[in-house]
Image (cartoon, grey):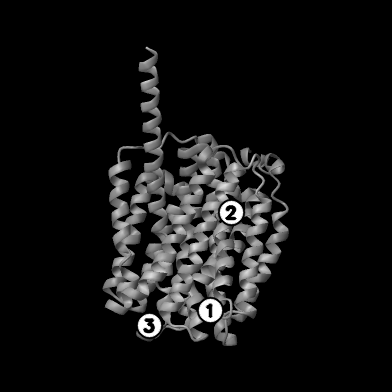
Amino acid sequence: MTTSGNTASVKAAHTETLAFIGGLLLIMALGLNLRPLLASASPLMEDIRAATGLGYGILAWLTTLPFLCMGAVALASGRLHRLLGENRGIMLSLAAIGVACALRQLSGTGVTLLATALLGGAGIALIQALVPGLVKRRFGSRMPLVMGFYSASLMSGGGLSAWISPRLAEMGGWQLGVGIWWVPALVTLAGWFLIFRRRGAPAANTAAIEGVRPWRLPRAWLLALFFGVINSGYSSVVTWLPQYYQELGWSAVAGGRLLAWMTLFQVLAALTMPMIAQRQKTADRRLLLAISLVMQLIGYLGFLFMPTSLALLWNAVGGFGLGACFSLGLILALDHLPDARAAGRLAAFMQGFGFMLNAMSPWISGTLREMTGSFIAAWALLAVGIVAMLAVTLRFNPARYPAVMRRAAR
């Protein structure tokens, strides 16, 4: 009897481990599909500009439009979740990303690029809005660890596309470089359908979902501002960093390679910082956030004063700060509420307005470039924002979370 019981326990543990690994791999596959639409065009901006005749201000909308979609869809994620459901919403989103990339490969007009930025951006946005609540619900106490792997895979997708796309463009033109990313979207869609098509999400805690009204909470607005500013650098960097270095004499391939180098450290940060957060005895993320913000600041100062002599160093340090801020920012929001769906709704609100702020960053940077003839003003503005957010970090004392979130249940 004891032997039988032990065998059953071992089998149950084995099954649980396999389920965890399978779920984690699917979450990571989702993340890999969320940045190629943005990052693949970055090292090819000059080719796209020459082929379409678009200026810097218009080209910035290739990044701005997806981030605006991320914000708008995140704010409507509660209604979309009820309308589509978790699994169907994710599958439709993967299909939208795949179709957008395929259209870019087929048609290289400026109109197509902008339209697919909207279509693909909507798909990216819905996945990003659904994943935090999904992870907190499915993975429980392992949430910080899984969010770290998700963030790392998200940034890996951006880095891989920035590295691979220029090489594909050399072989088959820039449309192949920006369009081939329909392939991983299709593969992930097939995997999600095969594994999760019969798994429905548990019944919603309607009271928790309907009771949380983030727009009534000053803390929710503070989180949105904080998340938006600390991640604004990513949208500007992924859009303009290769172009900045091309203006300093680097090639398109070298610029894409530099963005991929930065992404390596974003991935490293997205993995290590949540692992440290997982081991913390409390939910106090202030020290980790401060370290991450200082590293971003060092990167921007390097871009300003010594961009070429120590390019690898500034991109490594700044990339680590960017990667850490994204994953810690999501964990920070989820820490505020114990209920998974309520915390997911808060995280969606934070991402909604946060990504709208992100959306303006590449446009502002591109406009400053046209006005001043250099990206120096853009890096300086990002550095000022980071200094301001270092002061805001002091307010995220977990002992205060119950008090600042009390109105959420009213």
What residue did someone put label 1 on?
A: 366
| Rendered image: mark on residue 329 | 2
- Which secondary structure lies at badge 2? helix
Q: Which residue is mark 3?
A: 47
Image height check: is 117 above or below 58? above
Q: Nearer the viewer, residue 170 or 188?
A: 170
Residue 265 lies, in percent from the top left, at: 52, 62
Measure how far apart labels 2 and 3 are at the Cα level: 35 Å
Between the residue at mark 1 and the residue at mark 2, the CA separation in whole angstroms equals 26 Å
Please tell me which residue is depicted at 65% across the width and 39% down the height of the picture. Answer: 281
Q: Is residue 353 visible?
A: no
Q: What amino acid type is highlighted by mark number 1?
A: Gly
Q: Label 2: how many residues lie within 10 Å, few (<14), some (14-19) or many (20+)? A: many
Q: Where is residue 124 drawn, in percent x and y?
A: 42, 58
Q: Secondary structure at mark 3?
A: helix
Q: Report the quarter where the C terminus lies.
A: top right
Q: Residue at x 65, y 76 (%)?
A: 380
Vertical order, 241 against 141 (above or below) = below
- The tag earlier along the polypeptide, 2 or 3, is 3
- The image quarter containing residue 309 is bottom right
Earlier sequence position, callout 3 versus callout 1: 3
**Image quadrant assignment for residue 343:** top right
Which quadrant: the N terminus? top left
> Could you tell me how far apart the alpha carbons at marks 3 and 1 are, in whole angstroms?
17 Å
Q: Looking at the picture, which amino acid does disc 3 mark?
A: Asp
